C-alpha cells in the first residue's frame, strides 16, 4: 500500500514541478503544435508547446522506481531496503516507454518539417509492431497466461495466436488514445481514470492470490499509480486552455501502458469497457471512413467525433467535460464488473 502512495506522490510531484521548465524550454525552441485548418476554432492553439508527454513518461518511470525504495517497514523499523522489481512491471514499463519513443520520433519529424505530418503510416505502424513484438516475446518468456481473458482467464488458450493478439491490442490501444488526444485535457483526464482503475485492480489481485493467478500484481498496481500521478500533474497544465500538449509521445505511451496492464493483469477484454471512450472515438473514425468510401457520405461532420460536436456548436470545454463523464461511467462500469466477478468467484470458492 505504501508503494502505491509513494508512486503516485513522487510521479505527480516530479511532473508538476518540471512541467513549467519544459514549457519554457519548448517555447524557446519553437517546438509548437501544428493545427489542422479543418477546425478553425483551434487556430488559437497553433504554436502551443508540444511533446510534453516526454516529461510525463520520465516522471512516471522515476515515480515507479522510487516506489521500490523502502526506508521503513512494520517489522524492521527504519532502514534502507530495495523492493525487488517484478519482470511483469518492467515489461509494462518497456511497452510504455517503447510506444513513447515511436511517438517522439513522429513528433520530432513534424517539428523538423514544420508541418502536421510526421512518420509515414508504414513506419509508424512498423515501429509499434516492433515494440509490441518485443513485449509479446517477453510475456511468453515470463510465463504470462496466453488465455483470452475478461476479468480473469476464460479457459480459451490462444497458444501462438497470443502473439497476434498482443500485436493487435497494443497497437490498437496506442492509436485509439492518440485519436482521442484532440482536445485540451481529454486524453490526460480520461487516462488518469483508467490508470486509477488499474491501481485498484492490481492491488485487489495482489490481496486475493487464491482468486487471481497474476504474477507481479502489486508491482503492476504501483506502475499504474505512477502513471496516475504523472497524468494528473500533466492535466494541471493541459486543462483548457492548455499551456502544453502531450503530443504523440504522450498519447501513444499512455495507450501502450493501458494495453500492457490489461495483458499482464489478465483483463484483456475488460479494457474495452474501462477504455470505452477510446473505443467510441475509434469506431467513429472507422464508421466515417467506411461510410464515405461505400456511400460517398459522411456520418459525422468530422472524425474523431469529439470534433463533430465542436462543429455543431458545443464549446470545447463542454465536449471535454461530457466526454470525461463518459470515461468515468465506463471506468465505473468496468470496476463494477470486475468486483461482481470477484464476488461470484468468492462464493464458488467458499
Image: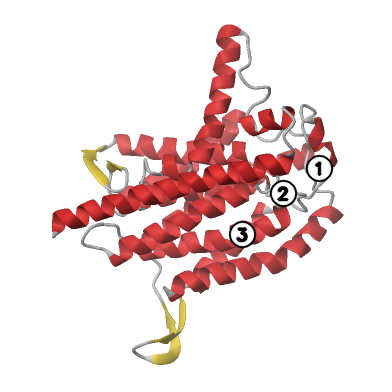
Image spot of residue 159 (x, y percent): 25, 38
Front residue of 310/39: it is: 310
Secondary structure state at the residue bearing disc 3: helix
Horizontal relation, residue 98 to residue 160: left or right: right
Among the 4 quarters of the image, the one containing residue 209: bottom left
Secondary structure state at the residue bearing disc 1: helix
Image spot of residue 247 (x, y percent): 68, 45
| Above or below: residue 115 compared with residue 249 | above
Front residue of 16/101: it is: 16
Mark 1 and mark 2 lie on one chain; the one further toward the N terminus is 1
Give the Cα distance between marks 1 and 3.
21 Å
Cβ atoms at labels 1 and 3 below 8 Å apart: no
Residue drawn at x 48%, y 59% is 224
Mark 2 and mark 3 lie on one chain; the one further toward the N terminus is 3
Residue position marked by numbered label 2 in the rendering: 245
Image spot of residue 176 (x, y percent): 54, 37
Cβ atoms at labels 2 and 3 below 8 Å apart: no
- Which numbered disc covers residue 232? 3
Give the Cα distance between marks 1 and 2.
10 Å
Residue position marked by numbered label 1 in the rendering: 45
Cβ atoms at labels 1 and 2 below 8 Å apart: yes
Among all residues in the image, which is located at the extreme top? Answer: 295
Locate the C terminus by quadrant: bottom left
Residue drawn at x 67%, y 39% is 319
Secondary structure state at the residue bearing disc 2: loop
Locate the N terminus by quadrant: bottom left
Residue drawn at x 57%, y 71% is 9
- Circle 2 or circle 3, nearest the eye: 3
Give the Cα distance between marks 2 and 3.
14 Å
Q: Residues within 10 Å of mark 3 (few under 14, many from 20)?
A: many
Amino acid at each position: 500500500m505504501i508503494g502505491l502512495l509513494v508512486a503516485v506522490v513522487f510521479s505527480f510531484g516530479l511532473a508538476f514541478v518540471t512541467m513549467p521548465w519544459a514549457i519554457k524550454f519548448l517555447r524557446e525552441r519553437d517546438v509548437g503544435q501544428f493545427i489542422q485548418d479543418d477546425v478553425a476554432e483551434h487556430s488559437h492553439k497553433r504554436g502551443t508547446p508540444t511533446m510534453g508527454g516526454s516529461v510525463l513518461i520520465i516522471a512516471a518511470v522515476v515515480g515507479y522506481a522510487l516506489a521500490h525504495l523502502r526506508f521503513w517497514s512494520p517489522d524492521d523499523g527504519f532502514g534502507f531496503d530495495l523492493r525487488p522489481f517484478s519482470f511483469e512491471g518492467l515489461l509494462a514499463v518497456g511497452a510504455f516507454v517503447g510506444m513513447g519513443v515511436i511517438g517522439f520520433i513522429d513528433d520530432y519529424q513534424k517539428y523538423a518539417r514544420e508541418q502536421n505530418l510526421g512518420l509515414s503510416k508504414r513506419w509508424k505502424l512498423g515501429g509499434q509492431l516492433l515494440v509490441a513484438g518485443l513485449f509479446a516475446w517477453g510475456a511468453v518468456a515470463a510465463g504470462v497466461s496466453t488465455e483470452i481473458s475478461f476479468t480473469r482467464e476464460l479457459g480459451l488458450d490462444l497458444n501462438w495466436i497470443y502473439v497476434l493478439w498482443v500485436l493487435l491490442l497494443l497497437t490498437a490501444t496506442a492509436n485509439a488514445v492518440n485519436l482521442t488526444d484532440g482536445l485540451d485535457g481529454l486524453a490526460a483526464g480520461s487516462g488518469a481514470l483508467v490508470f486509477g482503475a488499474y491501481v485498484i485492480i492490481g492491488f485487489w489481485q495482489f490481496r486475493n492470490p487464491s482468486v487471481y493467478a497474476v504474477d507481479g500484481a502489486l508491482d503492476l498496481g504501483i506502475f499504474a499509480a505512477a502513471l496516475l500521478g504523472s497524468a494528473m500533474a500533466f492535466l494541471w497544465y493541459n486543462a483548457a486552455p492548455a499551456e502544453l500538449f502531450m503530443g504523440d509521445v504522450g498519447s501513444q505511451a499512455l495507450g501502450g501502458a493501458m494495453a500492457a496492464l490489461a495483458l499482464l493483469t489478465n483483463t484483456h477484454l475488460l479494457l474495452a469497457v474501462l477504455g470505452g471512450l477510446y473505443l467510441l472515438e475509434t469506431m467513429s473514425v472507422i464508421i466515417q471512413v467506411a461510410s464515405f468510401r461505400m456511400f460517398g457520405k459522411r456520418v459525422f461532420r468530422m472524425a474523431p467525433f469529439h470534433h463533430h460536436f465542436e462543429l455543431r456548436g458545443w464549446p470545447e470545454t463542454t465536449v471535454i467535460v461530457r466526454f470525461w463523464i463518459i470515461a468515468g461511467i465506463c471506468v465505473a462500469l468496468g470496476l463494477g464488473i470486475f468486483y461482481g466477478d470477484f464476488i461470484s468467484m468468492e462464493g464458488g470458492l467458499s
